[in-house]
Amino acid sequence: MSQQQPENNNEELRVGVYVCHCGTNIAGVIDPKEVVEFAKGLPDVVHATDTLYACADSGQKQIKEDIKKHKLNRVIVSACSVRMHEATFRGAVSEAGINPFLMEMANIREQCTWAHGHDREGALEKAKDLTASAVAKSRFLTSLDMIEVPVTQKAMVIGAGVAGISAALDLADQGIQTILVEKEPTIGGVMAQLNKTFPTMDCSI
Amino acid sequence: MVDAARHPRIDVRTFTEVEKVEGFVGNFKVTLREKAKYVIADRCNGCGDCARVCPIEVPNYFDMNLAPRKAAYVPMSQSVPLVYNIDLDACIHCYKCVDACGALEAIDFSQEDKLVEEDIGAMIVATGFSHFDPSVMEEYGYSRYPNVITSMEMERLNNSAGPTAGNLIRPSDNKNPQKLAFINCVGSRDKRYNPSCSNFCCMYSIKNAILLKQMNPNVDITIYYIDIRTPSKGYEEFYDRAREMGIHFSQGRPSLITEDPETHNLFVHSEDVTLGKVMEKEYDMVMLNQAAVPQPDQNHMSSVLNVAQSPGGWFMEYHPKLRPIDSPTDGVFFAGACQGPKDIPSSVAQGSAASSRASRILQSDHWEIEPTVAVVFPERCSATTRGRACGICAKACPYGAINIFSPEIPAEVVTAKCHGCGACVAECPEDAITQLHFTDAQILAQMRAVLADKPEEKILAFRCHWCSYGGADLAGTSHFEYTANERGLRVMCSARMDTDFIYEAYRLGAGAVLYSGCHPQDCHYITGQLIGAKRASRLEKIFERMKMTDGRFRVEWISAAEGDKYARVLNEMQAVLDDIPMDDLKAEIEQLKPEMSKRLKKFPGVPGVQEAMDYSDILVDAITKQKEAA
Ligand SMILES: Cc1cc2nc3c(=O)[nH]c(=O)nc-3n(C[C@H](O)[C@H](O)[C@H](O)COP(=O)(O)OP(=O)(O)OC[C@H]3O[C@@H](n4cnc5c(N)ncnc54)[C@H](O)[C@@H]3O)c2cc1C
Ligand code: SF4
Ligand code: SF4
Ligand code: SF4
């Protein structure tokens, strides 16, 4: 497990910014092109463009091609929530050879156009600021690798009532060595003490 | 039961307890205490000759102490494994058992407890539940009146393998009862004891009533209940069947049981809610359906296993809706009633689910974890600068992921145990820890960007990833509109919201700041929210002393389901700003800036922060220029 570094090494930054329309979800309230124009003037931004659906295959393809063409080393996607598509865009940039942690999203849909539908001007200002915020963060992003740990392929189940027994049997049937630990002299738990059990009314053991 | 004992890949260790758990996902080291049985398991063939000759009898807990067992014993004849135990507390050392065992030589009084270490990759906790002791409810007379028994005693008495071979008799005179009452919710749904529902008592009282009625259709049975809860598949039909069989149901929790000292018959006093009538009915026998409660050693186990407990004492799952099987510790899962009362079908289902969650990890020889973890700058830790590691970080960490080996050695994060809440980062008084992907420099640069233009109009909102950010998303998804002056920043947990960020926001001239995370019981980092909340209330006091206008700093706990609340809070904060004349607001901001700067003296020394400040000046220039051009 290597210690990863919190500082980046002052490499020359080449930031690409993608402002999504999300059909009319975003573009129905603000003009993404205005955000693009704004982004073009931010430090280190070498490429900025709007895109109809950033998450669609075509949108992802465009980002991947641009990474090569413009030698991008940071990607900003101003679109929806990270809870929606962070994994999508991390995947896309890493396919084009950029570390997934060098992609940053700005949430201009759930937390902007959808929440400020009647304040177009306010929404536009906010979309610009959130995009600038993502660009700013990207200046200090560093490549990170998933941390890989070894696994001892053996399980332990603590408590041998009906739940523990069922877990142990399923693990063992999947080929996993399992230690079943029970503090009493017999396994079975409460169920072993019961008379017939609902819903089937059969004997409990 | 027998299948488990016979399975070639299951190693059953009975009479064994967990002493210690160390390590992390994929790499746990568990110390087990194998208690001495004084019988050599491999030699005992389960003949029971030792028990037959043993002269000592003690109550058998397995029979709810209704019947005796010997000092040489198995809890029940179908015990798995069928290996006898010698109960040394009861034994008088007559050694008759040794003679009876004879050539097998299975009995060994020199045995001692054995500590064994096991390396495992994942763990399933299935420690079950215990039973509420109704003797504390004086009104029901349990342990005073012989014919008031608990449901567990009933299960043993009604059981063909039990002490009476299934012949249900009254303890007072060994007669078969003809008139019986069951009382539900004894110690459940009762604010004095357990406010929650025990899940399966409704069903087992109906079960036992049906079984008794099947054996003898003439018995008269009444079930006293608050509500009958039969939501699972086929359960309502089960209830219908009981009513068709003539079992009576009376709604209302009985207030008192009295006894006729001559006959030992019982009188149940209650108010039948449906009839609106106060009643007193006579029975031969009364069964108390006692609450399911956490194991007596649940608190101890929770600290051994490093898993949290829900308010009722049960083990707490990672997320009640989305990750109900996982514990907050990676590689540790829950099954069955230890996580909350569950009947057998649910316990079996959860056992299977837990095995599949665990085998995700165990099927491969490695496992990947998110790298957004804490990293120590050893040269900044007080261990290096003053020869004394303060240990505040280790105390803050909800996962015990930070080691302080000695005062001179800087704190060390065990990366694989770190869940990336950022509590240690914000708590460290020396700014000697950072969190990857959520560094001070990154967050500062973001703050500068959103506060570049007319900061006094802005509401800077710090939200935790799991809850408040989700709440903000939901506000949008539901189109609950709120002020567009909000500028959101996301960290993983409110524990990461450093006081420096809040001071810096005001120093930069922010109109208002929201400090928002999950509710304490929803925290994705066990106790992260508690740390965040403590810090937030400290800040509230500080700003009060500074005479900051009420409402310019707001602390709110907002779940991912509370989109309406997120919108409301933001609109209320906007209203606070709208109420202050702009000149007054600007004057207040200017007046407090020196106070904020004073508290930020050490901030520029934090690794990366000076760089972020220099960069931000360029960024702010660019933003202003672009906005003017538009
Ligand atoms: C009176 C009564 C009647 C019931 N009737 C029915 C019925 O008819 N049908 C039905 O579906 N459900 C019924 N139930 C519910 C049923 O008992 C539970 O669903 C079931 O027992 C839960 O199984 P479990 O494995 O989670 O827990 P348990 O049965 O409690 O098993 C837990 C096991 O873990 C062991 N253990 C505990 N702590 C440790 C430790 N620290 N180390 C090692 N081992 C430990 C215990 O000794 C025990 O063997 C009834 C319950 C009661 C009280
Ligand atoms: S030595 Fe102890 S266990 Fe053995 S027969 Fe005597 S009393 Fe029973
Ligand atoms: S809190 Fe900071 S200074 Fe104290 S031991 Fe931890 S890293 Fe070192
Ligand atoms: S406090 Fe949080 S961030 Fe720090 S080591 Fe513990 S889990 Fe990781």
Image: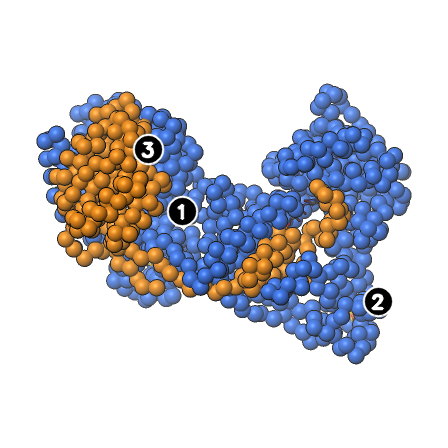
Chain colours: A orange, B blue
Mark 1 or mark 2, which has the lower sequence index? 2
Q: How many marks?
A: 3
Disc assigned to residue B52: 2
Residue B425: percent from the left, percent from the top? 32, 52
Is residue B445 toward the left or the right of residue B465 in the image? left
Is residue B152 toward the left or the right of residue A76 in the image? right
Mark 3 falls on what kind of element?
Answer: helix
- Mark 3 and mark 1 in contact? Answer it, CB < 8 Å: no
Q: Residue at x 84, y 69 (%)?
A: B53
- What is the chain letter for disc 2? B
Q: Residue at x 21, y 55 (%)?
A: A8
Callout 3 environment at 10 Å: few (<14), some (14 to 19), or many (20+)?
many
Pick whichever, B453 or B269, lies toward us.
Answer: B453
Q: Do pointers 3 and 2 mark residues of a single chain?
A: no
Q: Report the amino acid beneath label 1.
A: Gly
Q: Residue at x 64, y 39 (%)?
A: B199
- What is the chain letter for disc 1? B
Residue hosting label 1? B528
Residue hosting label 3? A110
Measured along the vertical axis of the image, is residue B293 above or below residue B178? Answer: below
Disc assigned to residue B76: none
Measured along the vertical axis of the image, is residue B616 above or below residue B280? Answer: below
> Could you say which quadrant of the image residue A175 lies in?
bottom right
- Mark 3 and mark 2 in contact? Answer it, CB < 8 Å: no
Q: Do pointers 3 and 1 mark residues of a single chain?
A: no
> Could you say which quadrant of the image residue A181 lies in?
bottom right
Residue A166: percent from the left, percent from the top? 62, 54
Pick whichever, B611 or B25, lies toward us.
Answer: B25
